[in-house]
Image (cartoon, rainbow, N blue to C red):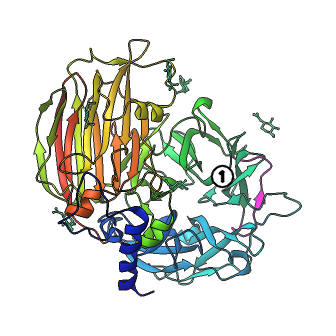
Amino acid sequence: MEYVSSVWLGVLVFISIHGYGNIGPCEASSRVIQTPDQIYRTGYHFQPAKYWMNDPNGPMIYMGIYHFFYQYNPYDAQAGNIVWGHSTSTDLVNWTPQPPALLRSEPYDFKGCFSGSTTLLSGGKPAILYTGVDFSDNQVQNLAVPKYLADPYLTEWVKSPYNPLIAPNSVNKIDGQNFRDPTTAWLNPDGNWRMVVGNQQNGNGIGLLYRSKNFIDWIQAENPLHFMNNSGMWECPDFFPVSTISQNGLETSTMGPNVKHVFKASKASTDFYTVGTYNPNKDIFIPDNKSLDIGLGFRYDYGKFYASKSFFDSATSRKILFGWVNESVNNLEINSIRGWAGLQGIPRRIWLHKFGNQLLQWPIVEIEKLRMNPVIEDTSVLMPGSVREISGVNATQADIEMSFSAKTLEKAEKWEANWTNPQQVCSIKSASVKGGVGPFGLLVLASKDMQEYTAIFFRIFRGDNNNFIVLMCSDQTRSSLHLPSSDYDKTTYGALLNVDPLQEKLSLRTLIDHSIVESFGGEGKACITARVYPTNLAMDGATHLYVFNNGSQSVDISKLTAWSMKTAQIN
Ligand SMILES: *[C@@H]1O[C@H](CO)[C@@H](O)[C@H](O)[C@H]1NC(C)=O
Ligand SMILES: *[C@@H]1O[C@H](CO)[C@@H](O)[C@H](O)[C@H]1NC(C)=O
Ligand SMILES: *[C@@H]1O[C@H](CO)[C@@H](O)[C@H](O)[C@H]1NC(C)=O
Ligand SMILES: *[C@@H]1O[C@H](CO)[C@@H](O)[C@H](O)[C@H]1NC(C)=O
Ligand SMILES: *[C@@H]1O[C@H](CO)[C@@H](O)[C@H](O)[C@H]1NC(C)=O
Ligand SMILES: *[C@@H]1O[C@H](CO)[C@@H](O)[C@H](O)[C@H]1NC(C)=O
């Protein structure tokens, strides 16, 4: 169908399916409602011009050019027909589309070129390992290499004549439905490459380990690199070294003193990671703290962020993380009507916290060149029950940095003994439930009358040992108001923040971009990404930004800077 008519079809179907014409408190009578397909597209978050995108694949830097590959459906805004989309950049902010790197072409990837990674082999030669789904729906592992190494854009890739390199069979007894997403390989001191593939056996999540001398013949190790009973399928594993003494990233094969390793697995729409020790002689990885293992401990993000993939940026010695940010849409028909689905989060720099058990994450510094027209507020007091607009910024495309402090925490409420799930506490104690210390924070993508908003806020509680517990929440219950809850996922997200509010300020960085809100609490200790579709953006072409405090104790804003963000060439 050609473009113009599909837009009109989109509007008509949208009205009839989703009752767009009947908006309740915000009467639309005299205003023009824009088509919802374009207003929710991003200004500076990566997305293809149209159709479906999901997992990031094989980010890397080659001859000074950043390469980003992604799971892409070239025909539709639904999952399916998966190929490797490809874009390049010199700054990780502005992207140029390239032809897909891998198309479905062979019996071993006839049903899709699924996720995988790139590895820089000796001499810096890139190689892609990816999962193909063959005619019989078996997941198999394949290799592709650039056709012309002299081409910095690597626009053509050649699949190996030895594919599939690894396939389930009666000897290895691997379950062909649960065998995917090879990691970037690392070079073991024994001179062989190592690589991990995600797997499940009897409900146990497993990172199967392989070794190879030539990158073609892969031998399965006797033991997995890591596994966890009853944790379900581990997708998109990632395994990499981090420095214990520096914020710099490490090349993937680095081992030895002052190095820890991070193992990440994606499951149940969540990316879990754990920090531990890799023993290259025994080829095992042991988490430092069993109670922080996969599924029990830290997550990259407590909202929408999945199937992430990291790479070492040798040009700047950084470890950088990409992650897929799914639509918050239950009725998938809406994606087809819009004609697009799926974003990438702003690439995050990651490094090990000085206490060693968790990573810190921060948007790459390059994104700051999109900042303009800063609105700066020095110290101000947020009285109990107050709401204040931050005007002068384009609140639909913005970057906000602020920090809070409280002179006393006397009014902190008690943390209940049965509150084991912070996300649940954020639901019980949403932004509209008054508290002691907090809720305080931001109302973003808000309507002028504040009927609609997404709230990112903190609450401080008193624990049993006279300690304080900091909760960070992203509350979507008042977001996307014109959209029926049945079609949209308005889950409230929450995380605990390892910050001592008596000693430290409580910082918040929030990136807002039309339909995505990415928040970094406690200088990157906890991240929450949300997707929302503001009505008022459709009706007014603009949104509003507020700070609020619904606690009974006043809090100070030590400093707040809000920038409007320029539009980037997102692809
Ligand atoms: C994990 O499950 C396997 C197979 O079911 C079993 O043999 C093993 O003992 C279990 N390991 C642990 C640590 O529970
Ligand atoms: C392991 O992690 C748990 C959960 O955060 C924590 O309570 C415990 O103190 C940690 N153990 C060690 C030895 O650090
Ligand atoms: C994508 O989002 C939808 C709606 O929130 C959710 O049902 C689904 O599980 C998500 N998928 C993944 C892989 O995160
Ligand atoms: C915690 O216990 C209280 C009192 O028994 C109960 O009302 C509440 O529902 C419980 N909360 C959770 C999250 O289980
Ligand atoms: C603050 O609390 C009051 C009373 O519960 C509520 O009406 C108001 O909506 C809350 N403010 C926000 C920003 O949620
Ligand atoms: C906000 O920025 C976007 C992108 O530059 C622009 O399209 C929009 O008109 C701006 N909105 C306002 C209210 O200035």
> Which percent across, then down, holds residue 217?
76, 67
Question: Element at badge 1?
Answer: loop
Q: Quadrant of the N terminus?
A: bottom left
The question of residue 221 being in magenta is answered with yes
Query: Can you tell me whether the CB of the residue at mark 1 lies under 8 Å from the nearest atom of ligand 1?
Result: no
Q: Is residue 192 visible?
A: no
Q: In the picture, residue 371 is in which quadrant?
A: bottom left
Q: Is residue 130 visible?
A: yes
> Which percent across, then down, holds residue 393?
15, 54
Q: In the picture, residue 367 is in which quadrant?
A: bottom left
In the image, residue 466 above or below residue 88: above
Residue in the picture at 11% in, 45% down: 376
Q: In the picture, residue 112 is in which quadrant?
A: bottom right
Q: Quadrant of the C terminus?
A: bottom left
Residue ID for mark 1: 189
Residue in the picture at 51% in, 53% down: 306
Toward the viewer: 434 or 187?
Answer: 434
In the image, residue 217 above or below residue 437: below
For the record, the magenta segment spans: 214-225
Residue in the picture at 43% in, 12% down: 465
Furthest toward the right, the residue is 170
Q: Main secondary structure of the magenta part?
A: loop
Q: Is residue 192 left or right of residue 464?
A: right
Identified by mark 1, the residue type is Pro
Toward the viewer: 34 or 322?
Answer: 34
Q: Residues within 10 Å of mark 1 (few under 14, many from 20)?
A: few
